[in-house]
Amino acid sequence: MSALHLGESVPPVLATILYLLAYRVRSRQLAGAGRPVARWRTCCLVMGVLLVAVVQLPPLDGLADTLLVAHMLQHILIGDIASLLIVFGLTGPVLAPVLRTRASRALRRACTPLVALALWAVDLYAWHLPILYQLAIRHDLVHACEHACLLWFGTLMWLALIGPLRKPAWFGGWSRLVYVFGMRLVGAVLANVLIWAHTVFYPVYASPDARRGLSPLSDQSLAGGVMMVEQVFLTTAVLGWLFVRWARQEEDRQSLLDLAARHGLGLGADRADRAARAGTAATARLREQLLAADGRSEHSAREAERSRS
């Protein structure tokens, strides 16, 4: 590996170490408090962060400078796949220290569905404008900024859909479905432009393509094709996961309401819904609280009966 490539590899490696250390520290704090992060969530976040680093290291990073299709693959892995894995690894308790800061107000606003989707779409199209796309190829600092924007705005997009932050009341099952199709529509338009265009948008790749015996238009069409195929598979997977999650949440919500009704305890539908949305651990905690409250009620009733006798 040349000294130049070694120097370019340092920032993503350092960022990876810092992200994983911060997550490990917070996970150990939560485990010590009896609120451990699920192992599958930890695995998802670790894979997401490592993926961000790997695609910015040789050999893919070098190919991205000379092949448009490789650069597009790099963007997909960072902006779609890695960001999704990272969001799977985030929970409310994990984000609690961040959410207690004043800066979190801007984060909460940016994670509302319409705002997050708009920011992600603007970021995606802006970086694929010829002037910015080619500037990123020519300048490493701009390239790093491009990748950071794709990751962060991709993370906001997924946080708005499946993250632990509170969602608007209107953002339910059908609204989430529309959100997913809106995401794919934004990506599909760009992919189709690249596939069917008869104009080379990124001449910076013309010479490397010629050396490989590949025409710039073919490289551009391949990049659009890769983007289109990835969207089909990712959309199918996300919709399937959302359906399973929705079904589980409905089951957990109803089980909490039934438990409260059987024991004569007051439990509002909103509270049961919030617990079900928060996940299995939150549902279990609320179930324990309900059973404990029922136990206290029975104990109080027995004490009252003894005092009357």
Image (cartoon, rainbow, N blue to C red):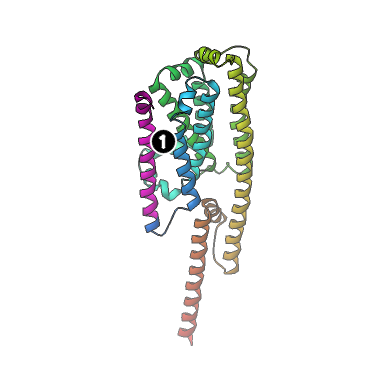
At label 1, the amino acid type is: Ala
- Residue at 52%, 33% in the rendered image: 77
- Percent across and percent down for residue 281 are 50, 57
- Residue at 49%, 13% in the rendered image: 204
Secondary structure type for disc 1:
helix
Outermost residue, bottom side:
309
Q: Main secondary structure of the magenta part?
A: helix
Of 1 and 189, nearer the camera is: 1
Of 48 and 2, nearer the camera is: 2
In the rendered structure, the answer to whether residue 168 lies left or right of residue 174 reads left
- Percent across and percent down for residue 73 are 54, 28
Task: Kindly tell me whether residue 182 is visible in this rendering.
Answer: no
Q: Which residue lies under the disc numbered 1?
A: 106
Q: Quadrant of residue 19?
A: top left
- Percent across and percent down for residue 277 are 54, 51
Q: Quadrant of residue 106?
A: top left
Question: Which residues are drawn in magenta?
Answer: 1-30
Total number of numbered discs in the rendering: 1
Badge 1 density bin: few <14, some 14–19, many ≥20, Cα 10 Å: few
